[in-house]
Amino acid sequence: MFRKLMTFDEAKQTINQQLKPEPLGTEELALLEAHNRVLAEDIVSVLDIPPFNRSTVDGYAVKAEDTFGAEENRPAKLEVCGVVHIGEPPRISVAKGEAAEIVTGAPIPEGADAVVMVEDTDRKNNVLSVYGTVTRGENVMKKGTDIKKGETVLKKGQVLGSREIGVLAALGKATAKVHCVPTVAVLSTGAEVTEPGKKLPSGKIYDINAYSLSTAVLESGGNPVYLGVVPDERAELRKALERALACADMVITSGGVSVGPKDLMPQTVDALGKPGLIVCGVALKPGKPTTVALIGKKPVFALPGHPTSALLVFHLFVRPVIQLWAGKPAEEAAAVKAVAGARMFSAKGRKTFVMVKLKRAKSNRLIAEPVETGASGAITTLAKADGFVEIPENQQFIDANEEVAVTLLKDAV
């Protein structure tokens, strides 16, 4: 099945050409349901924010010129003509020599062009003493200062977080047009795998991959649907895959892709429909048995059973597709410069990815220490590794103290 391996670049190119990944579609969601979704259109404000001149302090709305020359020992005397309440239009106007009581956020009444802070005044009945000068526009937030009508405030492709949702609410929008989230079915195979939460029988291990891969789907912008563990039996496997294809836009499996007697995934997937297998083995380490099929327009990514291999291959091949389907740009993972903490060897003829942990030396430079795995399935690698170093097919090793680029598995280290 793996007599002729694709190179890493050939596999990437084949996947992109066959899938042609692009956003799946759009939907309108209530604001509180749109969190962490990708905006599907530019947002242009149809109003000024604030929509009126408003006070930024508690005090009195005045004509600024009426306060000129006012000081501690010689206050300006003004007559209080009324009160401006928050949340309603002013019912009064301010004439020369007058002042209107106002609170923070209330609209500036006609005739006034500044606000004196209450701390700078003293009031007896309707006579207001002002002990300081204010200039025109002081303590006033003018109409459209924050957002102007016709201004593009959010761009298509932005992820809607708390700040963006707040902006939409400020514009009076109750809904947002967002890109649809791809549904991704995730299942594991193998007689040795059992689901967490159950008693662990002798000879079995808990299902790691389905949970780490489902979480990786979430982080990429997809909606994972966990379909459990399927035994290595052709009829059961086919039934589970058909169920997965019926309920999801994409299927991710782990295990059963090598060359053992129980590795039935490539043949089973290929028999589900055309065009069938498009990738069956990649010159990678780890990840050589990676298999990709296209059933109609739905891809099936059959990943290796080793936890580290499965997650690495996900980041290399699957993550970009989910991101594009969800309307996100297929961003390259962040990378940092470091120096190799030890010699790192490649697998002959295969692009090799060495998992590393980063630490900072006394000189403040980053050191990339290879994570001892013993085998590509070592579970602790998932927790210990901060990223990976790539060694090209034609390079035998990276020497200690050589500068390397570390692609991060996390957003920050």
Image (cartoon, rainbow, N blue to C red):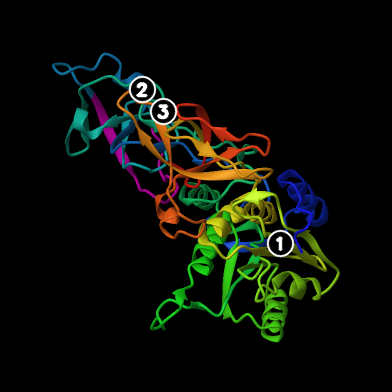
Residue 64: mark in rendering: 2
Residue 17, image x and y in percent?
Answer: 82, 51
In the displayed structure, 24 sits above or below 245; it is: above
Residue 382, image x and y in percent?
Answer: 45, 55
Residues tagged 3 and 2 counted as in contact (Cβ below 8 A): yes
In the displayed structure, 360 sits above or below 41; it is: above
Based on the displayed image, in which of its 4 quarters is residue 347 positioned?
top right
Mark 2, other Cα within 10 Å: few <14 / some 14–19 / many ≥20: some
Give the residues in magenta.
77-94
> 141 or 190, which lies in front?
190
Badge 3 amino acid: Asp
Query: Which mark sits nearer the N-terminus, 3 or 2?
Result: 2
Any part of residue 43 in sight: no
Residue 113: mark in rendering: 3
Residue 392, image x and y in percent?
Answer: 65, 37
Query: Which mark sits nearer the N-terminus, 2 or 1?
Result: 2
Mark 3, other Cα within 10 Å: few <14 / some 14–19 / many ≥20: many
Q: Which residue is mark 1?
A: 291
Any part of residue 383 in sight: yes
Instruction: Give the SS element for disc 3.
Output: loop
